[in-house]
Image (cartoon, rainbow, N blue to C red):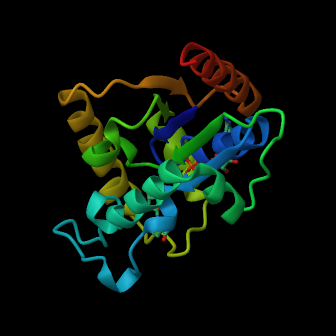
Amino acid sequence: MKCIVGIGGMTNGGKTTLTNSLQKALPNCCVIHQDDFFKPQDQIPVGDDGFKQWDVLESLDMEAMLGTVKAWVKKPQKFARAHGVTLQPHDPGTHILLIEGFLLYSYKPLLDLYSRRYFLTVPYEECKRRRSKRNYTVPDPPGLFDGHVWPMYQKYKQEMERDGVEVVCLDGMKSREELFHQVLEDVQNTLLNSF
Ligand SMILES: Nc1ncnc2c1ncn2[C@@H]1O[C@H](COP(=O)(O)OP(=O)(O)OP(=O)(O)O)[C@@H](O)[C@H]1O
Ligand SMILES: NC(=O)c1ccc[n+]([C@@H]2O[C@H](CO)[C@@H](O)[C@H]2O)c1
Ligand SMILES: [Mg+2]
């Protein structure tokens, strides 16, 4: 049985942290990080807001990401082996894929593949605070958060709500442990219900 779970939500909501803990706890579990599909810096245009447009869907090679997801769907065992995921002999029939990223549910070709779509958020102030401490491969220029990151987050979130995308909202202000146990239990129930 194959199960695809989305760990989506805003930047610095805690998606990667949660995903890494879940992967360790779930059997035969592979992960795809949307951040691995950012286009090279020279292909990211500067927008009317004066900033390089990192926080739009076009900054990502989503066709390549879709191809990677399809490779997992076709041969999860082969995918696991190729990505160093040890398959568990006592749980041979279960295969889980966690897809993690900040613009998961804005890309239509993947939308119906998820068994569950989680969405992590924190309040604006906390998001800005966490972000200011981060060091991305391309560092944030001054003003990026208020000038580009936050407005784009709001735009995509509004589109998601307009399109009626069904998500399970997660409060990113909860502790790492609480979030981990909440989602682990929910994923395990989803698995049980789909047998
Ligand atoms: N539940 C939590 N409570 C407090 N801090 C957290 C929690 N989860 C993650 N963090 C911290 O917040 C920051 C962002 O976490 P993380 O990298 O997991 O977020 P993300 O959603 O993957 O962000 P990005 O937009 O970079 O992909 C990190 O410093 C992390 O240690
Ligand atoms: N990983 C990258 O190449 C990169 C470069 C510039 C900005 N970002 C930021 O990553 C966040 C998503 O995790 C987005 O908010 C980007 O601004 C990533
Ligand atoms: Mg992340």
Where, quadrant-wise, is the N terminus in this rendering? top right
User: Residue 155, how many percent across, how many down?
Assistant: 24, 43
Q: From this viewpoint, is residue 150 visible?
A: yes
Nearer-the-camera pick, 8 or 48: 8
Q: Is residue 87 above or below residue 53?
A: above
Nearer-the-camera pick, 109 or 146: 109
The answer to whether 40 appears left or right of 126 in the picture is: left
Q: From this viewpoint, is residue 107 visible?
A: no
**Across the whole image, how many numbered discs are drawn on residues?**
0
User: Residue 49, how many percent across, how many down?
Assistant: 21, 65
User: Residue 127, how many percent across, how many down?
Assistant: 51, 43
Residue at 64 percent of width and 49 percent of height: 30
Where, quadrant-wise, is the C terminus in this rendering? top right
Residue at 54 percent of width and 41 percent of height: 13
The answer to whether 20 appears left or right of 32 in the picture is: right
The answer to whether 118 appears left or right of 147 in the picture is: right
The answer to whether 191 appears left or right of 147 in the picture is: right
User: Residue 123, how many percent across, how many down?
Assistant: 48, 33
Q: Is residue 87 above or below residue 193?
A: below
Nearer-the-camera pick, 192 or 20: 192
Residue at 38 percent of width and 75 percent of height: 39
Residue at 63 percent of width and 16 percent of height: 192
